[in-house]
Image: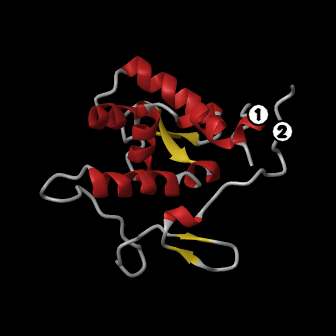
Amino acid sequence: MNWLDYDTDNCSVQRTLDVIGDRWSVLILREVFNGIRRFDQIKTHTGISDSVLAHRLRKLVDAGVLQVRDYADPGARRRKEYRLTDAGLDLQPVLLSLRAWGDAHRAGQEGPSLEIRHTDCGARVDLELHCDAGHRIDDRRDVHAVPGPGARRVAG
């Protein structure tokens, strides 16, 4: 199998990165997953500029990852907050994988700055790979790619 024989124009990784492939978009998603949903709060917590934040939020909304909801604090004007759509919630394992890698390879001596817990029982949440047959995959080298139904050979 030679992957150079296949076109990458319809690669799902590439298409995903078109939506969330920059630092600020991932950090915005981190904030929304952690319950920070308002423009000013996201700006303050990340240090992102107004223009970059507005652009990234618009891009995430247009891609169907976030949705906009109006809110108004008592005595204040209407404002917007950002909530995850089902497509946005599907990105949770991606962010959890990034966090797990950072915990394993970039955490300071004190350890990770946050833990992910199961709401119902309080136990730590871990990610694991498994196949459709139910086998847990402990050795990452036991996974390989094969052409899927959308694979296209390079014209030539």
Question: Tag 2's secondary structure?
Answer: loop
Across and down, in percent, residue 115 comes to: 30, 63
Image: 16 above or below 77: below
Across and down, in percent, residue 7 comes to: 76, 33
Q: Amino acid at mark 2?
A: Arg
**Residue found at x 45% / y 51%:** 95
Crowding near the residue tagged with mark 2, few <14, some 14–19, many ≥20 C-alpha atoms within 10 Å: some
Q: Amino acid at mark 1?
A: Asp
- In the displayed structure image, the side of residue 6 where residue 82 appears, left or right: left
Image: 107 above or below 68: below
Across and down, in percent, residue 156 comes to: 87, 25
On the question of residue 131 being in view, the answer is yes
Residue indicated by mark 1? 7
Residue with the most extreme front position: 1
Determine the image quadrant of residue 45. top left
Across and down, in percent, residue 75 comes to: 36, 36
Q: Nearer the viewer, residue 1 or 64?
A: 1
Question: Tag 1's secondary structure?
Answer: loop
Image: 124 above or below 92: below
Q: Are marks 2 and 1 in contact (CB under 8 Å)?
A: yes
Residue indicated by mark 2? 152
